[in-house]
Amino acid sequence: MKINELLGTEFPIIQGGMANIATGAFAAAVSNAGALGLIGSGGMDAETLRKEIRTAKASTDKPFGVNLMLMNPHIDELAKVVVEEGVKVVTTGAGNPGKYVPAWKEAGIKVFPVVAAPILAKRLERYEVDGFIAEGTESGGHVGEMTTMALVPQVVDAVSVPVIAAGGIADGRQLAAAFALGKSRRKETLPVEPGEGIRYVVPQSLTPGEEGVLSFRVSKPCGAVVYRVRAGEQVLRQVRRPRAVPGEMERILLSRELTAHVRAPIRIEMEVAK
Ligand SMILES: Cc1cc2nc3c(=O)[nH]c(=O)nc-3n(C[C@H](O)[C@H](O)[C@H](O)COP(=O)(O)O)c2cc1C
């Protein structure tokens, strides 16, 4: 899936979340222009962020997001505000957002951590984030030491989710290079049609020792759902979602360690609460 399809925007471009600059009105203007606007919450407390989110909501009907700077002293409250205000996309800067990601995913928020090294991306992929922003040292954010040109291909190779390039991209030539370096599609796409039943099983094509992401959409709305990835009787992964939204992409990551000793075919079982 292309990034703009994933984000619901016209263009595959995300505005940088700039602390003390990117207000709700700023983000809404970017979203109205067809990219994804981001509120830069770096210098904000919880009530300021809430106000800016409401300003953005009043100024655009297009998707916008919030950048959460993890070194912000109010970060615990800000992490809750994005859930309470129904924000659709969160990007994070300056650290490891792992402890917040499960609550954001539970709320249906699309999460894109900014990373400056492949190792952090690898570590965070287990939280089923929706993609990474690989940002080189050319960026205004001063995130790390690797350049965009060196960093982005390494992150692409390290993870299975989409990777967005950032840092030093200012004109059309650099944009073209970013498209060549980044990654918009996943390794595995699997159609799932759950039908009327409460259980659904599909065969899977991952082979033992292979790493991959099972990506699929459900065709019918339903309440709480548990996806179980099995190899024979062995449950490799179990993921609970509060609801299944038709058409929305579901993803389950299977690491190399998980599939290494599997001997039976891998399949997904979907159990829907009655
Ligand atoms: C003034 C300014 C403030 C920024 N503040 C943040 C921030 O609070 N959080 C963050 O994740 N990135 C921040 N960034 C980085 C941007 O979001 C963006 O990723 C980066 O600027 C992209 O690189 P480029 O400026 O070379 O295009 C900031 C950048 C600038 C220029």
Image: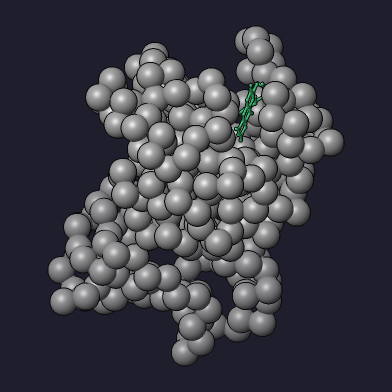
Q: What's the image's color scheme?
A: one colour
Does residue 20 appear in the picture of this structure? yes
Task: Identify which residue is drawn at 35% across, 55% down.
Answer: 107
- Residue in front for this viewpoint, 252 or 223: 223
Task: Identify which residue is drawn at 26% across, 54% down.
Answer: 245
Q: Position of residue 264 (x, y in %)?
A: 54, 83
Q: Position of residue 255 (x, y in %)?
A: 63, 67
Q: Position of residue 33 (x, y in %)?
A: 39, 14
- Residue in front for this viewpoint, 203 or 105: 105
- Dividing the picture into quadrants, the one containing residue 42 is top right
Q: Quadrant of the C terminus?
A: bottom left
Q: Give the farthest residue toward the right.
A: 145
- Above or below, comparing residue 88 to residue 15 in the picture: below
- Residue in front for this viewpoint, 210 or 129: 129
- Dividing the picture into quadrants, the one containing residue 227 is bottom left
Does residue 9 appear in the picture of this structure? no
Task: Identify which residue is drawn at 55% across, 24% down.
Answer: 20
Judged left or right of residue 147, residue 208 is left
Judged left or right of residue 70, residue 12 is left
What is the total number of numbered labels drawn onto the structure image?
0
Q: Give the farthest residue toward the bottom.
A: 233
- Above or below, comparing residue 104 to residue 143 in the picture: below
- Above or below, comparing residue 61 to residue 45 in the picture: above
- Residue in front for this viewpoint, 73 or 192: 73
